[in-house]
Image (spheres, rainbow, N blue to C red):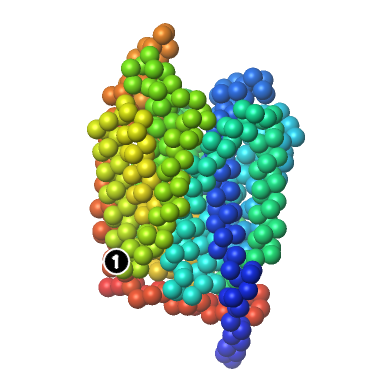
């Protein structure tokens, strides 16, 4: 007997204060997530003294957050599709806030690393928010909102560094985490007040085996990539981690193809529109992240190096600040380009602009003005590319899988950033010279890093052009009353 058709939910009032604040509230939470990823950076040089731990142990304050974010983003995205995106979004923000509270109360390095792992859960805020926007907004408002949400990653990163440095410089370092705990609590309350729960759900049982397998495989892979330079790329632990990652992910892939309700729909990923978008996300993440890594190191290098400017961490943050402002201002422009030409053209253009920005850096990396110009051009390209990636995913996947599909896309960006960090470190270690008895990267090493990032960006642009042409606008999700309503919204693949 056929099940009765779901009763449509009455249209949501879009004129009230809560409805008007949905987009700003989600954007605030996205910026807060990115801030949380960067606030610990100014602390790293002082943490060995403050905690009594070694520098290698302290580095896990960054590694733990990276690993947790990579593992939890696709898992929480899938949970959002099945159990409610707003509910899982609140969970992510609550874990992030709890991590801040723990950091503000202790100087024990083990607890600090654990707390940073909790904060890594916040990386899922952006894909979950984009999925909520798809479900709640009419098509004419969706592209601009998604572009703004995507740009929050760069905006928050640009704001977090100088803000954290100022707090640390003029207050106790625990105060920084109290501030972020307060901001996180505010985000939770705002989400509860202004953001509705989407009724678009996918039924079935959560793939626990798939989640555990993906977690194990990603931890092995990213741990090997992030620690290879320190432990030795040919060392037994690194080779063992790579082998373990290959074995676990191969078994996970087999399980996903056989599972009735897989964590990641690999048949969907195999579609050119989805799979190539993920490849482009990996390449763009690599190219974008090199800008932040190299710029910060270059401007802080001592003047005795012959190229460095000897800037403080606060001054470095201010150098990167225009990049965040540009990303905020350009997000509506990227949405209009996507609406006129399609997101794949926006993605290709964005990646090409990233490469052009590195061209500026190669031409002149001694002048502060030109360094800022080059970094800002890279941010312009990043804004275009990052706004286009979720738009491509939204057009290519069913409405019931938007959070998990966007989670996988963010995961690919994270993997790209991890590989970028390892590659940049390898290049700079290979090109060093002694300055006042200390080994420092040479200017040539930085230029090589810029060249590698530019080449990867051009590869990302080429991959974007290979993505099949944009289909007609995606089907609207069927909105129903009831916790288990399901939207069909399946996007058809172009021939």
Direction top: furthest residue: 437
Residue 360 location (% of width, % of height): 27, 37
**Residue 249 in sight:** no
Q: Is residue 290 left or right of residue 128?
A: left
In this view, 155 is above or below 55: below
Q: Residue furthest bottom?
A: 1
User: Residue 329 occupies which quadrant of the picture?
Assistant: bottom left
The answer to whether one can see residue 132 in this image is: yes
Out of 156 and 398, give the one closest to the viewer: 156
Tell me: 469 left or right of 18: left
Residue 351: image location, x then y, percent: 31, 50
Front residue of 405 and 131: 131
In the rendered view, would you say 486 is above or below 310? below
Q: Position of residue 485 (x, y in %)?
A: 60, 77
Disc 1 target residue: 341
Please identify the quarter of the rendering in which residue 216 is found.
top right
Q: What residue is drawn where x is 60% and y is 78%?
A: 12
Question: Is residue 161 found left or right of 428 in the rendered image?
Answer: right
Q: Quadrant of the N terminus?
A: bottom right
Residue 361, position in %: x, y?
30, 34
Residue situated in front as seen by the camera: 104 or 275:
104
- 199 lies left or right of 449: right
């Amino acid at each position: 007997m056929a099940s009765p058709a779901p009763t449509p939910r009455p249209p949501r009032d879009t004129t009230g204060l809560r409805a008007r604040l949905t987009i700003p509230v989600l954007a605030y939470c996205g910026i807060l997530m990115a801030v949380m990823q960067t606030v610990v950076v100014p602390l790293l040089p002082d943490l060995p003294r403050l905690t009594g731990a070694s520098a290698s142990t302290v580095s896990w304050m960054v590694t733990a957050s990276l690993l947790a974010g990579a593992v939890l983003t696709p898992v929480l995205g899938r949970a959002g599709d099945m159990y409610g995106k707003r509910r899982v979004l609140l969970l992510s923000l609550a874990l992030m806030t709890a991590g801040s509270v723990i950091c503000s109360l202790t100087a024990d390095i083990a607890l600090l690393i654990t707390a940073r792992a909790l904060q890594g859960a916040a990386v899922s805020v952006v894909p979950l928010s984009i999925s909520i926007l798809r479900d709640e907004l009419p098509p004419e408002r969706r592209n601009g909102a998604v572009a703004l949400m995507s740009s929050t990653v760069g905006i928050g990163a640009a704001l977090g560094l100088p803000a954290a440095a100022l707090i640390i410089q003029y207050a106790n370092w625990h105060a920084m985490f109290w501030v972020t705990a307060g901001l996180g609590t505010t985000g939770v309350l705002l989400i509860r007040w202004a953001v509705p729960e989407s009724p678009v759900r996918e039924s079935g049982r959560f793939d626990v085996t798939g989640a555990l397998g993906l977690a194990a495989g990603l931890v092995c892979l990213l741990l090997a990539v992030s620690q290879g330079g320190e432990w030795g790329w040919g060392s037994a632990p690194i080779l063992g981690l790579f082998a373990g990652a290959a074995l676990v992910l191969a078994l996970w892939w087999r399980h996903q193809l056989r599972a009735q309700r897989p964590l990641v729909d690999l048949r969907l990923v195999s579609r050119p529109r989805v799979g190539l978008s993920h490849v482009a996300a990996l390449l763009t993440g690599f190219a974008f992240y090199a800008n932040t890594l190299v710029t910060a190191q270059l401007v802080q290098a001592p003047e005795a190096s012959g190229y460095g400017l000897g800037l403080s961490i606060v001054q470095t943050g201010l150098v990167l600040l225009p990049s965040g402002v540009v990303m905020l201002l350009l997000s509506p422009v990227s949405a209009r380009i996507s609406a006129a030409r399609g997101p794949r053209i926006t993605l290709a253009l964005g990646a090409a602009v990233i490469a052009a920005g590195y061209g500026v850096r190669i031409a002149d990396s001694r002048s502060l003005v030109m360094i800022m110009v080059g970094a800002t051009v890279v941010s312009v390209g990043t804004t275009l590319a990052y706004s286009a990636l979720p738009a491509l995913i939204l057009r290519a996947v069913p409405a019931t899988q938007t959070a998990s599909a966007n989670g996988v896309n963010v995961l690919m960006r994270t993997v790209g950033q991890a590989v970028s960090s390892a590659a940049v470190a390898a290049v700079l270690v290979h090109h060093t010279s002694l300055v006042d008895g200390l080994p420092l990267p040479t200017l040539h090493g930085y230029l090589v890093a810029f060249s590698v990032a530019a080449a990867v960006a051009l590869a990302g642009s080429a991959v974007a052009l290979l993505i099949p042409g944009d289909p007609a606008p995606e089907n609207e999700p069927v909105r129903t009353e009831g916790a288990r309503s399901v939207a069909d919204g399946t996007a058809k693949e172009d021939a």
